[in-house]
């Protein structure tokens, strides 16, 4: 597919907006930066993954430190452990660490 920069920006805004909206409904009492971390997670893996996750269950229960640790479990792509250099997907591990760090800011 081809898209103009304007179309790409519109797609991104729509996708990110949907991710934020989902998290706002799913975890309304979570701190704002925790919501942003979860929204980035949803943008990356989809709302169903967050909806079924221990991460969301813990966030809803107010167990935020434990919820943040759950990001470290989401490091597999197509059955490959992205912590292993041979898997060639180390960016996932870095992204999860950034999400975890963002979630914990201000707790």
Image (tube, rainbow, N blue to C red):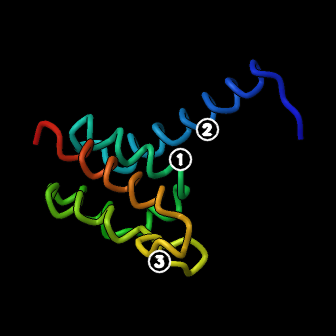
Instruction: Answer with the quarter of the image where residue 3 lies.
Output: top right
Q: Nearer the viewer, mark 3 or mark 2?
A: 3
Q: Residues within 10 Å of mark 3 (few under 14, many from 20)?
A: some
What is the quadrant of the C terminus in the image?
Answer: top left
The residue located at (54%, 32%) in the rendering is 17
Q: Residues within 10 Å of mark 2 (few under 14, many from 20)?
A: some
The residue located at (51%, 42%) in the rendering is 19
Q: In the figure, is residue 13 to the left or right of 74?
A: right
Relative vertical location of residue 88 with respect to residue 11 in this rendering, above or below: below
Say if mark 1 contacts mark 3, CB within 8 Å.
no
Say if mark 2 contacts mark 1, CB within 8 Å.
yes
Separation of residues labelled 3 and 2 (CA atoms): 26 Å
SS class, disc 3: strand
Relative vertical location of residue 86 with respect to residue 100 in this rendering, above or below: below
Residue corresponding to mark 3:
81
Name the outermost residue toward the top: 6
SS class, disc 1: helix
Q: In the figure, is residue 32 to the left or right of 93?
A: left
Residue 39, image x, y percentages: 43, 44
Q: Of 27 and 100, which appears nearest the observer?
A: 100
Residue corresponding to mark 2:
15
Q: Earlier in the sequence, mark 1 or mark 3?
A: 1
Separation of residues labelled 1 and 3 (CA atoms): 20 Å
Q: Residues within 10 Å of mark 1 (few under 14, many from 20)?
A: some
Residue 53, image x, y percentages: 38, 68
Residue corresponding to mark 1:
43
Q: Earlier in the sequence, mark 2 or mark 1?
A: 2
């Amino acid at each position: 597919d081809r898209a103009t920069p304007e179309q790409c920006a519109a797609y991104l805004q729509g996708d990110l907006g949907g991710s934020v909206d989902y998290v706002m409904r799913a975890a309304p009492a979570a701190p704002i930066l925790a919501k942003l971390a979860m929204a980035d997670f949803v943008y990356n893996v989809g709302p169903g993954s967050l909806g079924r996750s221990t991460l969301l269950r813990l966030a809803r229960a107010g167990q935020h430190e434990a919820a943040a640790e759950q990001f470290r479990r989401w490091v597999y792509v197509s059955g490959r452990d992205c912590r292993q250099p041979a898997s060639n997907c180390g960016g996932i591990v870095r992204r999860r660490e950034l999400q975890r760090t963002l979630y914990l800011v201000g707790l």
